[in-house]
Image (cartoon, coloured by chain):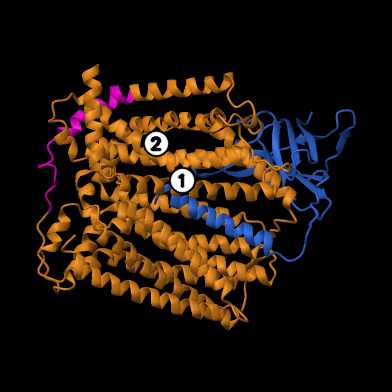
Chain colours: A blue, B orange
Amino acid sequence: MKKSTVIVLLVVFLGSVLVVGIFGMQAVPWQEIVYVDKIEITNILTSSGKDVDIKYNEKHNYYYAFIYYEPVKVTQLDEEGNTVEVDAFEVTLVWDYSPKNATNNKVKVSIVEPASPPCDPLTDNAKLGRGDPIVFRRAGNVHLRYAAADSATGATLDIWLYVVVQP
Amino acid sequence: MKTYLRNLKTLVVMQLRDKLDLSFIRSVRSTIIKVMLAIIKLAVVIVVFWGLFTVCKMLSVFRPFGYIPDTVVNVLFTLIQLMSIITCTVGLTKTLYMTADNKVLLTLPVSSTNVYMSKLVLYYIFELKKNVGLTLPLFVAYGIVNNAVWYYYPWMLFCFLFISLVPVAIGAVISIPALYVGKFIARFKWLQAILVLGAASAVTYGLIYVIGIIPANINIMGQWGYIYQGIDKFLNAFANVFKPYYYLTLMMVGGTLRIRAQLVQGDTFAYWGVMLACVVALIGISFLLAKPLFVKMASKQFEFDKRTSRPHRNRVHRRRLSPFFESMQMDLRSSTFVIGAFIQLVLPAIAILLLNRLYAAMNTNYSGQVMTKTFNLLVMLVMTLAFNNTYASVYSREGAARNILKTRPQKPVYTLFGRIAFRAMVIVLSTVAVTVTYYLAQSYRVVDGETVQIALDSVFVKEIVLMGVITLIVSEAHLLWCADMDLMNNFADQYQTVGVQFDSPNERNATIVGFLLAALFAFLYYFLSDRGTYSSLVKGLVIAVALIVARVYLFITRARLYFVEK
């Protein structure tokens, strides 16, 4: 297919979406965009089942929590794809956003420190989705950042997890 | 050096005469008509781009202050250049190493360097011609809309003399690995099948991913601020990813605001110098690596290349059906043809699915609903008709073998129909697929993450079926029209002597006719509606039937009268 034909097809396709989007919509002239203005950690759950106290550092504007490292047997896949049981400690952060009617409620979670990869002391394939436990394979500190994806200057939340060995 | 340049010029002119129809130069009248037509064509393309930019400017799509940022023209320019690199690589691989005329050219009293460079110069001229026809009007329109300084236009012409070298130089270098990869893949049918399946899976996965991320609620006007930011982010990210091409864009336009007063500055010449150095380096590399390979390939004997296959028992087909089986066998031998047929089958349906997912996310009024149906018909037609264009050179591509067809002891119309029969079948299957997809896209909606079936109005179902029938009839009529163009104005001589992708005027005309037909039927559907859109579809169907009857009659009559003569 020629370049000009491909361009015509793209123009027709995009044009058909734009024309309907501009001239064929119900008369709703303006739909307010509601941005996420606050993200907060409501609870921290651990595989040991013990309560965790979340603290806030007002001076530097971040949350932090001290958690004792109490490993349990966790099923994982090794490099060859076999299921193996390893000692690890799972921490699940329960978080929420407000207001609830935000137009785009996606929140990006990223590991700020330690720089990845590898995400030591976390497992290499650490998942950071909502409800995913953060798996520590040894005691250590992790700095996580929660940022609203609806704008570059949107709400953010920083939290330090200090996972320490019980004395 | 003087002799070298004279030889080079002779070789280029000689090959140009083969590849282009320059007979109009002999007559002043023909030359004037040809030049006028070229100017009109250029003006039309400029007006089309100017119209698009003006609409975007009026609606403040890219900037609130009524101008078009350089990142917009950069996206279009980069896409065209990337496509050029692909076409140049494919074309040069064929032109440099696989063309039959290489064997003749190497017998001439010139050096192999002369022949090699003449091929590159020839490709450069074709690239320049293509750029003048598409990319230059894009930049001229951009300059008009953004009130460019007067010397922007001559500067553009100067830039394009060098810009056209870029894809040719890159293509010449990439043609070396492309040749080896192509030859390796051509050797194994199973590898071709795996690659086709892999590519098809990747494309399908990509499209399903795109369909999956379509938001549940689209309100372009209501969410304009959000969309505006998204467009801006995309344009900047695109410029960042393809930075070298963004610098080329800056070299040509200066910048979004600089285009109006301070177009050419020190950095402009820096970009120009770097571009020229890169082109020289690439041509140098291609000369050192590709030229020896070119000489080796061009002087290779081809008589013994053909692999022998086990003899098969000759199946005798009915006399009238034999051309159909023959064409099908020839077509299905080519993996490129099979891939093309697969794309022709699947792409229109995926496009309709994507379009309807987008429409489903919009809260449209009555007028919007009619528009969505109209655009469904338009996209169905445009997509299906676009694949017919290559059939405007279906007979010419056979080169001298075309004359052998004339000696067959049967009516030529069977042979001629045979060559387009496979595409006609693909059209039928593709139209069925696209109609079923449209029906399913309307019948099933995703509400809160769950797929819900919706009972469709029986009149609407009939409309979907009628749209499919109209698409089918118009596509078949257009296919016949394309074949008819090639029948009446064939370029078999050019295809016989030229191994490159010959830029057939018939294909260009077929594109225009196809687009006009699609626009006409969409226009009729929208404006001939009378208390509902069903009536306009019935009117459209009558016109479509009249069109195919006329095309069949003309094709058969012309095949009888002119095929043997022309």
Q: Which amino acid type is marked by label 1?
A: Leu
Residue A44 lies, in percent from the top left, at 79, 44
What kind of element bears circle 2?
helix
Q: Which residues are magenta?
A: B285-309
Q: Is residue B302 magenta?
A: yes
The answer to whether residue B114 shows anywhere in this view is yes
The image quadrant of residue B413 is bottom left
Is B297 positioned to the left or the right of A30 in the image? left
Please name whichever residue, B295 or B161, is drawn nearer the observer in this view of the structure: B161
Check residue B128 in the rendering and tell me which mark sits there, or answer none: 2
The answer to whether residue B202 shows anywhere in this view is no
Please name whichever residue, B13 or B296, is drawn nearer the observer in this view of the structure: B13
The chain letter for the residue carrying disc 1 is: B
Select label 2 or label 1 by which is in front. 1
Instruction: Residue at 49% x, 55% y: name it.
Output: A9
User: Furthest residue to the top?
Assistant: B1
Q: Which residue is mark 1?
A: B42
Is B464 positioned to the left or the right of A113 in the image? left
Same chain letter for marks 2 and 1: yes
Please name whichever residue, B346 or B479, is drawn nearer the observer in this view of the structure: B479
Instruction: Residue at 74% x, 53% y: name it.
Output: B223
Q: What is the spatial separation of the Cα atoms under label 2 and label 1, in whole angstroms?
A: 14 Å
Q: Is residue B128 magenta?
A: no
> Which part of the image, by quadrant, shows the N terminus of chain B?
top left
Relative to B338, is B429 above or below? below
